[in-house]
Amino acid sequence: MLLEKILQSQGFGSRKYCQQLIKNGSVSIDGEVADDLKKQFSPENLEFSLFGETYQYREKVYLALKKPKGFECSHQPHHHQSVFSLLPEILIQRGVQAIGRLDQDTTGLLLLTDDGKYLQALTHPRKHVPKVYHVTTIDPVTPEQIEMLSQGVSLHQEKGVFAATDVKILETHQLTMTIHQGVYHQVKRMIAAVGNKVEALHRHQVGQLVLPELEDGEWVYLSEQQKQLAQNII
C-alpha cells in the first residue's frame, strides 16, 4: 500500500496533504525518512513516526473511555462539551463513533470505534448485550424496589416489560443493576417506575468488559481479548 494511503486511512488528512507530509520528509519508518511517494509498504504491524510521535497502523480502532459528567456523546452537542473533544483529532478524522450513548450526566465506560460491523454487533437489540450500572438514588433503596426491578416494570410509550438482572443493594442509596436493552433513559425511567429517582448513574461494564483503570476523560485502545469481552463472547 502506498504510504499516502496509509496515512490517510489513519486520520492524518486528505491524500494531497499526506503526500505533502511525505515529500517534506516528515514521515520516518524504521528510523529512516520515508519520502518516496511510489514505494509500497505492508500496513500489517507497520510503525511509523510523524512529528516526533510513533504510531502503529490500525485497520480499525476500538476504544474504551471513562466518560466524565457533563459531556454529550455527540459530534454536535447542544448544551455541553462533546465527548469527542477528549480524543485526538486523528481519531475524529477516522470517523470514530460512540457505541451507544450515555447521557451527559452519566459517567463510566463508553466504547468507541470506526468499525461499523462491531458497532452493530454491540448495539443491535437482538444481541441483548448486558450493561451493568451503579445507581445512586435520592431516596433509600428498598427490598421491594429491588424485587420490582427484577420482576420488570412498564415504561411509558414503550412496548413490553423491562426487567433488570443481578439487582443488588450496595448501600442505603446505591444499587447495581444489569440491563439487556437500550431504550431512551432506560435506567432512570425504571428507577422512577419503582418510586425512586436517580441522583447519579455510572456504567461499570459492557458485556464482560469491566471499565479499565482510567482517570476521568482518559481512554485506551482495546486489546483483541477486550473487544471480545465487550461482545460477551468469552
Image (cartoon, rainbow, N blue to C red):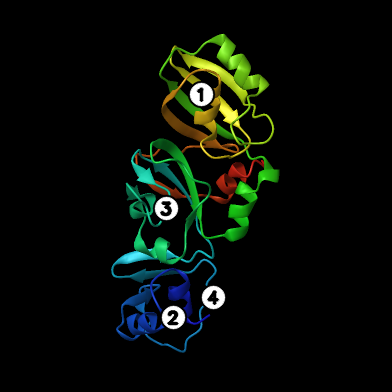
Mark 3 or 1, closer to the camera: 1
* Viewer-side residue, 101 vs 9: 101
Q: CA distance from mark 3 to mark 1?
A: 26 Å
Instruction: Give the position of the C terminus as an image quadrant.
Output: top right
Residue beneath label 3, please? Answer: 74
Residue beneath label 2, please? Answer: 4
Q: Residue at x 48, y 56 (%)?
A: 97
Q: Is residue 121 left or right of residue 10?
A: right
Measuring from the top left, give residue 44's x and y in whole percent.
Answer: 55, 69
Label 2 neighbour load within 10 Å: few <14, some 14-19, many 20+: many
Label 1 neighbour load within 10 Å: few <14, some 14-19, many 20+: some
> Which element type, helix, strand or loop, lies under badge 4?
loop
Label 3 neighbour load within 10 Å: few <14, some 14-19, many 20+: some
Residue beneath label 4, please? Answer: 42
User: Identity of the amino acid at label 1?
Assistant: Ala
User: Identity of the amino acid at label 4?
Assistant: Ser
Measuring from the top left, give residue 1's x and y in whole percent.
Answer: 53, 80
Confirm or deny contact between disc 4 and disc 2 (CB under 8 A).
no
Mark 3 or 4, closer to the camera: 3
Residue farthest to the front? 157
Residue beneath label 1, please? Answer: 192
Question: Splitting the image into 4 quarters, where does residue 125 fall?
Answer: top right
* Viewer-side residue, 79 vs 39: 79
Q: Is residue 216 left or right of residue 132?
A: left
Q: Residue at x 61, y 47 (%)?
A: 122
User: Identity of the amino acid at label 3?
Assistant: Ser
Measuring from the top left, give residue 147's x and y in whole percent.
Answer: 62, 15
* Whether residue 88 is situated above or below residue 64 in the rendered picture: below
Q: CA distance from mark 3 to mark 2?
A: 30 Å
Point out the tag, 4 or 2, that comes first from the N-terminus: 2
